[in-house]
Amino acid sequence: MILITGGNGQLGTELRHLLDERGVSYTAADVNELDITDKASVDAFFDKNRPTVVYNCAAYTAVDKEEGEGKELGEKINVDGTRNIAQACARVGAVMVQISTDYVFGGALPIGQERFPDDKKHPESEYGRTKDLGEQAIVASGAKYYVIRTAWLFGSYGPNFVFTMQKLAQTHAELTVVNDQHGIPTWSRTLAEFMTHLVDSDAAIGFYHLSNDKKKDEDVTWFDFATEILKNTKTIVKPVDSSAFKQAAKRPFNSTMNLDKSKATGFSIPSWQEALAKMLEQGDLRADKAKTKGESSK
């Protein structure tokens, strides 16, 4: 049995659609079906269902809220909840696939350099700290695990940067976007495919980094990402320093991840531009189908 926790979130929904397309059966559980912070409930669920693979897409990702009002909840979900799932996986012999983040590193990585899976961690935000502790809990559990660190996630399901930019462009002739935070966008579809690839190929357990790919020596910022999103609109995108936006959580200066280990598993990674274009194309196709369906029902 395949179990997806956080099944109604952005990544969980993407993963469900991917498995549906492949005709793979699974059980998707969100907080109403399985509260991962409740150890007794997790143990009972695992004893009854005996999953063989667990894709843990449940997480607290309100990065700024976790610096204040969301601190306790972030700890419960990202640390305690992850530990509960990992220990249950170890007990029943299930493979655990965990999604983590570039926020576990912190520090000012120079532009042009990349984060490797075995780089030293030094989180500088509550979100980074709790995700790091979650990683440590998985390793300590003794479960067979794949921890995939990712960044700048976007996709068709749930709020994300792409939809935010598109919505703002509808009412603004000009937008300012930060150009001093560096990284690579990650399409949720690419991430979901990589999650299943690691399991299906029986890759070596451990830590992996996954974003979409970039051209050699290409430097990508949020400004570049926004410019690509809105390149076919009349909205003008202008660069601005991140000091112009007050945010509670400290953002990584450079989130660019090295993908060599992930590529070595035989997984093909499309560029972030290709991924964005495909995601937008799929959205347009769904919109056209919905419009045609609506017109035909009149």
Image (cartoon, rainbow, N blue to C red):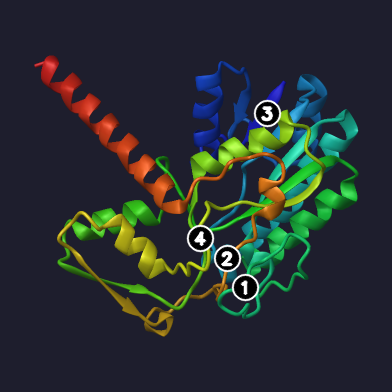
Q: Which mark is residue 204?
A: none
- Residue beneath the point at 79% across and 20% down: 48
Confirm whether residue 6 shows in the render: no
Confirm whether residue 152 shows in the render: yes
Q: Nearer the viewer, mark 1 or mark 2?
A: 1
Q: Earlier in the sequence, mark 2 or mark 4?
A: 4
How far, Cα to Cα, is label 3 from label 2?
30 Å
Q: Going by the image, does 175 lie left or right of 198?
A: left
Q: Earlier in the sequence, mark 3 or mark 2?
A: 3
Instruction: Tell me which amino acid carries mark 1.
Output: Gln
Look at the image and tell me in which quarter the C terminus lies. Answer: top left
Q: Which residue position is annotated with label 3?
A: 3
Residue 36 in the image: above or below residue 176: above
Q: Which residue position is annotated with label 2?
A: 256
Q: Earlier in the sequence, mark 1 or mark 2?
A: 1
Q: Nearer the viewer, mark 3 or mark 2?
A: 2
Q: Which residue position is annotated with label 1?
A: 113
